[in-house]
Image (cartoon, rainbow, N blue to C red):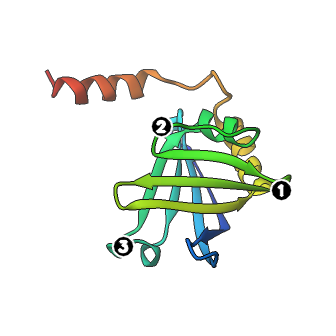
Amino acid sequence: MPITLEQPTGAHLLTPDGDELAVPVTLRYTYADALAVHFVFPAWISLDDEEVTWTFARVLLHEGLGAPAGVGSVRIRPCGPVRTHVEFRTPAGIAVVRFDTSALRRFLLRSYEIAAPGGEAVGPALDRGLASMLGGV
């Protein structure tokens, strides 16, 4: 039985000129993709007017709540005691989104109720990944 956790939350997109744009974000975790978390942004915030989902390692979220983490397209760092910045990097630029740390921590703890850290079922994800790499051979 597939288990999915969805937690709507508010965030702020920080603009290069120092303005902030309030944006709703849905935080999603699924047991079927137990090593990842998904941040879903509404279509009106994207350049191509389509909903945008960023998927990255759940452990990156955990690490980024305590100290700067990430070296790739997603980077997370605390911003004071109650806020967390998440940077999403693309060839088109960098988007910095500020979240309340308590919302991210609550989401992470709720995801641990579905699959404890280290207790994720990686077999299905590994099988999908290998099949994708090998082209179904």
- Could you say where residue 131 lies in the image, as x and y percent from the top left? 24, 25
- Could you say where residue 3 lies in the image, as x and y percent from the top left? 56, 44
Q: Residues within 10 Å of mark 1 (few under 14, many from 20)?
A: few
Location of mark 2 (residue): 33
Residue 21, above or below 52: below
Q: Quadrant of residue 10?
A: bottom right
Q: Earlier in the sequence, mark 3 or mark 2?
A: 2
CA separation, marks 3 and 1? 29 Å
| Side of 12 where 49 appears, left or right | left
User: Can residue 2 be seen by looking at this rendering?
Assistant: no
Q: Amino acid at mark 1?
A: Val
**What secondary structure is found at the residue carrying circle 2?**
helix
User: Can residue 136 be seen by looking at this rendering?
Assistant: yes
Q: Residue at x 59, y 70 (%)?
A: 13
**What secondary structure is found at the residue carrying circle 1?**
loop
Location of mark 3 (residue): 47
- Could you say where residue 42 lies in the image, as x and y percent from the top left? 48, 71
| Side of 110 where 89 appears, left or right | left
CA separation, marks 3 and 2? 27 Å
Residue 2, above or below 42: above
